[in-house]
Amino acid sequence: MMNIPAFEVSETKKNRFAEFVSNFTHPPFLSIPTFIVLNLFLLDPHNFFVITGICVFFAAILPVGILIFWAKTITKDELDFPIKEDRRYPLLIVILSYLIGTVILFTLHAPPMATSLMFCYFSNTLVVFFINLYWKISIHSMGIAGPTTALFIVFGFFGSILAWLIPVVMWSRVYLKRHTMSQVIAGASLGFVFTGIQIKILYGFIFRINLDVFPIFWLVYAFIGPAIVLSIAGYLNNKGMKDGYTRKTIVFFGFISIVIYLYLAPIGATVFLLISGCLYVAIAFFSSPGFLWFDGIRRILDAP
């Protein structure tokens, strides 16, 4: 069997890097550059400052203030709440902040995308609240996929810059044991799908604009597909399924899906899939043995 070593980086440094990524990519923080970029493109200078100020206040400043206050209330020193029960009350207040922001933006006739994205912050967080009652889905993953959807709709593939954070954020959340792999994958998937569907509905029924959001689903496969493939490979390896019909069936359908994607997807999505796959592989090598992606790479390279 081929020995596939992880990169020689101490676990302490990996942990620090994972904590940095996790803190830096907290959803309210990422909302700031997202709204700034959108409004710079969609508004004139005078309205830009007013609308962007409202967006930043209700999507970032107020939610972060709420999280800090709640963290101190329950004597925690971080904005992350590993225990899902600790998330309930701050989530409810943050949801209210997003809703108020949406109403104000709509009243002021803000750009449809800014209003729609604020509404998606409200509705997606509401969905997270109910899921969180039973299962700790990743808010971080969803908090990247949602804004990426809005940016992609406005700027095309050039607007998907935030999506490149998804593999790193997934790794950090799982490495820190804040989530399972299924929870981070589910968060990113729902972030793309829910946001795309809601923006389509809002544009059609509220703003009377026919908007094509189907291309966003190419990003779902490009940025989440490799995570699923490596996770399944790692799971099968850990279960000792080196051969057999189960493994062969999964490999077959995985191969077919990639072929169909490469045949149908636009060139931009194809390039993104290839680069995204390389990024996931690099992160897998960076990870330690026992991390699903690392175990998946080992199995792929060791396979007869």
Image (tube, rainbow, N blue to C red):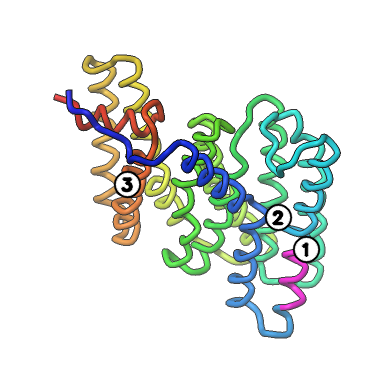
Q: Position of residue 139 (x, y in %)?
A: 62, 42
Q: Quadrant of residue 2?
A: top left
Please give left or right for residue 21 compared with residue 231 in the image: right
Query: Above or below — where is 180 with respect to 112?
Result: above
Residue range highlighted in magenta? 49-56
Task: Confirm or deny contact between disc 3 and disc 2 (CB under 8 A).
Answer: no
Amino acid at pointer 2: Phe
Amino acid at pointer 1: Phe
51 within the magenta span: yes
Q: CA distance from mark 3 to mark 2?
A: 32 Å
Tag 1 secondary structure: helix
Q: Quadrant of residue 102?
A: bottom right
Query: Above or below — where is 171 with respect to 241?
Result: below
Provide the residue designation for mark 1.
57
Query: Above or below — where is 71 with respect to 20?
Result: above
Query: Above or below — where is 187 with respect to 117?
Result: above
Which residue occupies 60% across, 49% down? 143
Provide the residue designation for mark 2.
119
Residue 277: image tag = 3
Q: CA distance from mark 3 to mark 1?
A: 36 Å
Which residue occupies 65% across, 57% down? 29
Q: CA distance from mark 1 to mark 2?
A: 14 Å
Packing grade of label 3 (10 A; few <14, some 14-19, many >=20) is: many
Image quarter of the C terminus: top left
Amino acid at pointer 3: Gly
Q: Nearer the viewer, residue 137 or 26?
A: 26
Image quarter of the N terminus: top left
Q: Nearer the viewer, mark 3 or mark 2?
A: 3
Task: Confirm or deny contact between disc 3 and disc 1 (CB under 8 A).
Answer: no
Q: Position of residue 136 (x, y in %)?
A: 63, 30
Give the main secondary structure of the magenta stretch.
helix
Q: Nearer the viewer, residue 282 or 276?
A: 282
